[in-house]
Image (cartoon, rainbow, N blue to C red):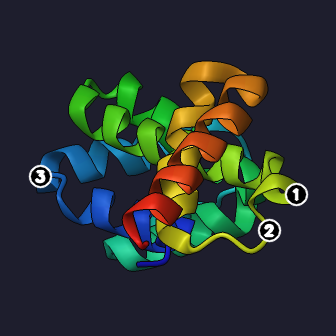
Amino acid sequence: MAPKKPKKVLANILENLSERNFKKFCSELLDRDKRVKRSQVERKDFLEVAEVIIEKYADEALKVAEELLQQIDCEQAAHDLGEYGHTIRIHSSCNSCLQGSSAQFQCFFSLESHETGRAGFLEKRKQVSSLQIYKNK
């Protein structure tokens, strides 16, 4: 299964916030800087707010959202978003070594590479690849 796109993940996180926390999130977003206008988030739903965040913050969107969630004390949502954000950043930084891998391997390896570093990641990839070949014989 292919990894979800950042916009979809962010929308899912925002959808699961209580109405009160969603309002607090939008308020913190407006207070953060002047990139986001009040008219872009006021009386908007989670999908529209997620789209605005992705549009305004691009590659930093998930990190910004994670920080905002922490500021409003939504620790679990911030943690969930941070986990996904690490996966995305590692996918883009390790793209050359993942060429030709299936999406399932990308998800596994991206989390593994975060814990073991690039050298450990490549070694682990060899071990799992060998295991897969052995299992298929």
The answer to whether mark 3 and mark 2 are in CB contact below 8 A is no
* Three-letter residue code for mark 1: Ser
Where residue 12 sits, quadrant-wise, is bottom left
Nearer the observer, 135 or 2:
135
The label on residue 96 is: 1
Judge from the rendering whether residue 89 lies leftward or rightward of residue 137; answer left or right: right
Q: Which residue is mark 3?
A: 18
| Residue depicted at x 62% and y 52% | 88
Mark 2, Cα crowd under 10 Å, few <14 / some 14-19 / many 20+, is few
Q: Alpha-carbon distance for marks 3 and 2?
A: 40 Å
Of the numbered discs 3 and 1, the one sitting upstream in the chain is: 3
In which quadrant is the C terminus drawn?
bottom left
Q: Alpha-carbon distance for marks 1 and 2?
A: 6 Å
**x, y percent for residue 78:** 36, 35
| Residue depicted at x 59% and y 45% | 110
Judge from the rendering whether residue 137 lies leftward or rightward of residue 62; answer left or right: left
* Three-letter residue code for mark 2: Gln
**x, y percent for residue 62:** 57, 48
Query: Extreme front residue here?
Result: 137
**x, y percent for residue 31:** 56, 37
